[in-house]
Image (spheres, rainbow, N blue to C red):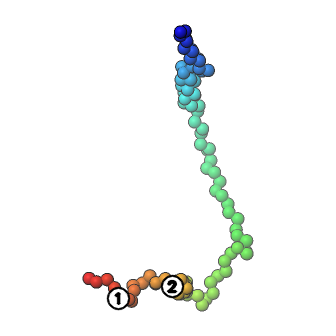
Amino acid sequence: MQLRKPKPKPTPFVSSSTVIALLLVWLLSGCVTQPKQPPSMPPEPVRLQPLPQSAIQPQLPPECSPTCLQNLTTERERWQTLLTGAEPQGSSAKPSTTQR
């Protein structure tokens, strides 16, 4: 019986010491660069162009009072509960069916 010799391990393409040295150089090179100086003058503020006339909302008519939107919202919520059959968010008028 003939014994086989173990195959030698292939040598790596780059040795670990080379990788560590390159990594160290790369990390240290970040400390060498000079920080950028801030600009001497502050940037100019952004100037917005005015909206075209077609994009401007019209003024509210005089018959609209501050409670107009609130009343409309309340009415819309009431219509929604009627359409969906959901119970309104207020307290229920039905007595409790659980025994105490």
CA gap between label 1 and label 2 equals: 19 Å
Q: In the rendered view, tell whether residue 50 sits above or below residue 68.
A: above
Residue at 44%, 82% in the rendered image: 89
Residue 74 as seen in the image, left or right of residue 39: left
Residue 74 seen in the figure: no
Task: Tell me the kind of residue under disc 2.
Answer: Gly
Name the one closer to the observer, 22 or 33: 22
Residue at 62%, 47% in the rendered image: 41
Per the image, label 2 sits on a secondary structure element best described as loop
Point out residue 27 in the picture as x, y percentages from the top left corner. Answer: 54, 29
Q: In the rendered view, tell whether residue 47 sits above or below residue 7.
A: below
Residue 97 as seen in the image, left or right of residue 36: left
Per the image, label 1 sits on a secondary structure element best described as loop
Residue at 68%, 63% in the rendered image: 48
Please name the residue that numbered disc 1 is placed on: 95
Residue 97 as seen in the image, left or right of residue 53: left
Residue 85 seen in the figure: yes
Please name the residue that numbered disc 2 is placed on: 85
Q: In the rendered view, tell whether residue 57 sits above or below residue 63.
A: above
Label 2: few (<14), some or many (≥20) within 10 Å? few
Asked which quadrant contains residue 2, the reply is top right
